[in-house]
Amino acid sequence: MIIELHLLQSFPVSNLNRDDVGQPKTATFGGVSRARISSQSLKRAARLLFAEHGLEKRETATRTKRLCDSAADVLRGQGKDAADARKVVIAGLESLGFGVDQVTGLTEYLLFVGGDAIEYLAGYCGERWDALLAVAAAKNGTKKPAKIKPDAAARAQAARLLDATRAADIALFGRMIADNKDFNVDAASQVAHALSTHAVATEFDFYTAVDDLKPNGESGADMLGTVDFNAACYYRYANLDLEQLHTNLGGDADLAARAVKAWLGAFVHAVPGGMQNTTAARTMPGSFLGVVRERGAWNLANAFLSPVVADDLMAASTACLLKHFGGLRRFYGSDGIHTAVAASATGDVPETDGVDTADTLDAFTTRLLAPAMADA
């Protein structure tokens, strides 16, 4: 069973997801420039909300290069020598096959690990303190060692460190480790880059700032510059394969059920944090379409291949979305589609064959979760 979530969300002046030169991300679609928010940005915004939507903190993961310092802090708290703890953890991570910068203590790439990984790493290193300390002492402290190929026992320990069966967000969004495919996790949820339903041009805000301590009589700004922004109505899309999620979580039905609810709730409320302190673009989705299907998935972005032009972008985009969905159902058939439900914060939802409507967000999510969870 697969759940699809289609959202329309309008943001006022904002720069939610910047490119390498600070401009709002864009993409050309349907021959015109669109505002864009990357899927990575949306997934991070959703992940940070999981604890507010039914998951416990220990059931969520951490993406970090800083396992070393965190595990060393645990060892120091257990009374281990503060100067040696970091060296021992670096040696411990290397014994498990992970490259570590000898100066900064950072792993060579971000590791996406479960909630108990730091405690586990500290325990692994604490049990082997003397042996790992001897390994660390044999180095000069700055030399970058050759990457160690772990033996079978060490690989088993590394697998335990990276165990993802209790981390809902790894199960949902997957994990890829380029140099060890055994630790990869196939994502249960696919997330699209959000695109504006209409053409968008990046604009520039010229700003000035005045020194509060400037002597009286002196005029003029003390700092000036420009900030890039846009304003757009976005189409957002994500899907969730319940069978893959169940597999990723080791068959834990209770955790899988709570992960589905958290995914749905978090994605509805997820807003990227880019420049929010200066734009406060904290809007909510205006229109919703949810689909529960037995197989396949439909990204409905082509509803906006011709950019929407209207005074009321949300209403016009909602009509385009439902019209496109209805057209696909007529042409390809409804085989495999279990439920389709639409909702709107304004209450105005165009009638569409085969699409039920919900009056509230709670009713919308309940209609989606009931059939999906019954067959999970």
Image (spheres, rainbow, N blue to C red):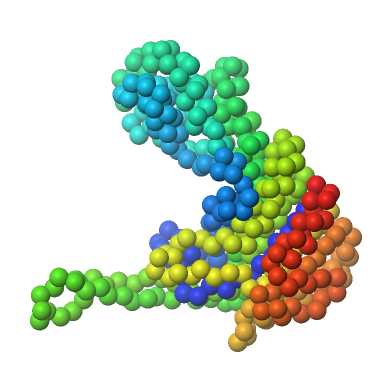
- Say which quarter of the image contains residue 265: bottom right
Looking at the picture, how far across and down is residue 78, in whole percent? 41, 24
Q: Residue furthest bottom?
A: 311
Query: Relative to residue 63, is residue 218 drawn left or right?
Result: left
Q: How many marks?
A: 0
Q: Is residue 239 left or right of residue 371?
A: left
Q: Position of residue 215 (x, y in %)?
A: 10, 75
Determine the residue positioned at 64% across, 37% down: 166
In this rendering, does residue 107 appear at all?
A: no
- Quarter of the view holding residue 194: bottom right
Q: Nearer the viewer, residue 189 or 305?
A: 189
Q: In terms of depth relative to the viewer, which is nearer, 71 or 149?
A: 71
Q: Is residue 273 visible?
A: yes
The residue positioned 72% from the left and 47% from the top of the image is: 257
Give the answer, above or below, for where 275 lies relative to 53: below
Q: Position of residue 262 (x, y in %)?
A: 65, 52
Front in this rendered view, residue 117 or 63: 117
Where residue 357 appears, x then y in whole percent?
78, 72
**Residue 184 picture quarter:** top right
Q: Is residue 307 above or below residue 119?
A: below
- Asked if residue 332 lies left or right of residue 24, the reply is right
At x 66% / y 75%, what residue is drawn? 345
